[in-house]
Image: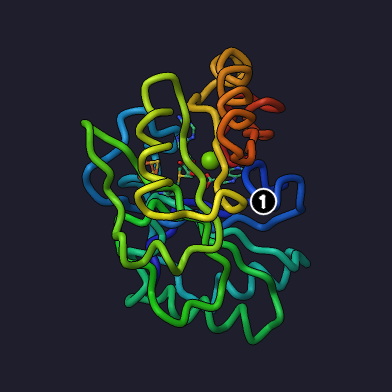
Amino acid sequence: MLILHEIFASLQGEGPHTGRPAFFIRLSGCVAPLCPWCDTKGAWDQGSETSVASLVSAVKESGHRFVVITGGEPLRQWETGLNELDRALFDLGVAVQYETSGKVPIPEGICGEVICSPKYLAGAWHVDSESLSRAHHYKFVACEETATAIDAFVNAEHLDKDRVWLMPKGMTREEQIERLPFVWDHCVTNGYRLASRLHILAFDTKKGI
Ligand SMILES: C[S@@+](CC[C@H](N)C(=O)[O-])C[C@H]1O[C@@H](n2cnc3c(N)ncnc32)[C@H](O)[C@@H]1O
Ligand SMILES: Nc1nc2[nH]cc(C(=O)O)c2c(=O)[nH]1
Ligand code: SF4
Ligand SMILES: [Mg+2]
C-alpha cells in the first residue's frame, strides 16, 4: 500500500523534461528537516492508502507514457510499495521520473530516472551523499542567499555541471519572475543549466497542475 496525496495529468514544469506531457503521482509524507518555503506543504500529512494495482490502472487509463512520481518525499515509501510500482511501470514500458530531495537514500536498482534536489537548510546540506551518484540530474532551489553554497556543494561533490540545474526559489508567479534574472546570470557565470517552473508561470499557486 502507498499513501497517496493526489494524481493529475499535466506537463512536466521543471527540469530536463520540461514541457513533456506527464501523469503525476504525488505521494504523502516528507522527512525532516522540512523546507519552510515548500510549495507543497499539503502533501506532508494529507493522503490516503492506495494500492499499487489501482495506481497502475490509473496510469493505463490515462494513456500517458511518462509518469512523474513526486511528493512529499516519494522514496520514503520505497519498501512499502513504491518498489513494486517502479517495477510494474517499467514492465509496462512507461517512462518514470522521480522528484526527490535525496534526504533518504536513492535505492540501488531503481528503474526510473532520478532528479535529486538537494536541500540547503539552516546552513547545512541534507542529502544522502552516497546516493548522489545514483541521481541522473541535480536541481537546486536557487536564490541570492543559497547561490554561493550551491557553487561550493557542486565543486565539493564534483557534480557534472551539465547535469546541474538551477531553479528559482519561489512558490508564486511573482517571485519566479522577480528572481529569474538573478538565477539566469548565476547560470551563465557558472555553467549551470536553468530550470524554469513553467506551471507556476502559467498557473501561479493553483494546486494539482
Ligand atoms: C514539492 S518537491 C517534492 C519532491 C521532493 N520532496 C523534493 O524536494 O525534491 C518538488 C520540487 O519542488 C521544488 N520546490 C518546492 N518548493 C519550492 C519553492 N518554493 N521554490 C522552488 N522550488 C520549490 C523542490 O525543490 C523539488 O524540486
Ligand atoms: N507541472 C508540474 N511539474 C512539476 N514538476 C515537479 C513537480 C513537483 O511538485 O514535484 C511539479 C508540479 O507540481 N507540477
Ligand atoms: S523535501 Fe520537498 S516536499 Fe519535503 S519539504 Fe522540502 S520541498 Fe517540500
Ligand atoms: Mg510542484
Query: On the rendered structure, is 147 left or right of 9?
Result: left
Residue extending farthest bottom? 91
Query: On the rendered structure, is 173 left or right of 144?
Result: right
Which residue carries the number 1 mark?
Answer: 16
The spot of residue 147 in percent (x, y) is 43, 28
Ligand number 2: quarter of image: top right
Q: In the image, what residue occupies the spot 59% across and 28% down?
A: 189
Q: How many marks?
A: 1
Task: Give the amino acid at mark 1.
Answer: Pro
Q: In the image, what residue occupies the spot 64% across and 68% down?
A: 58
* Image quarter (top left, top right, bottom left or bottom right) of the C terminus: top right
Q: In the image, what residue occupies the spot 48% across and 63% down?
A: 135
Q: In the image, what residue occupies the spot 55% across and 63% down?
A: 136
The spot of residue 47 in percent (x, y) is 38, 53
Q: Can you say whether 199 is above or below 105 in the image?
A: above
Q: Can you say whether 91 is above or below 50 in the image?
A: below
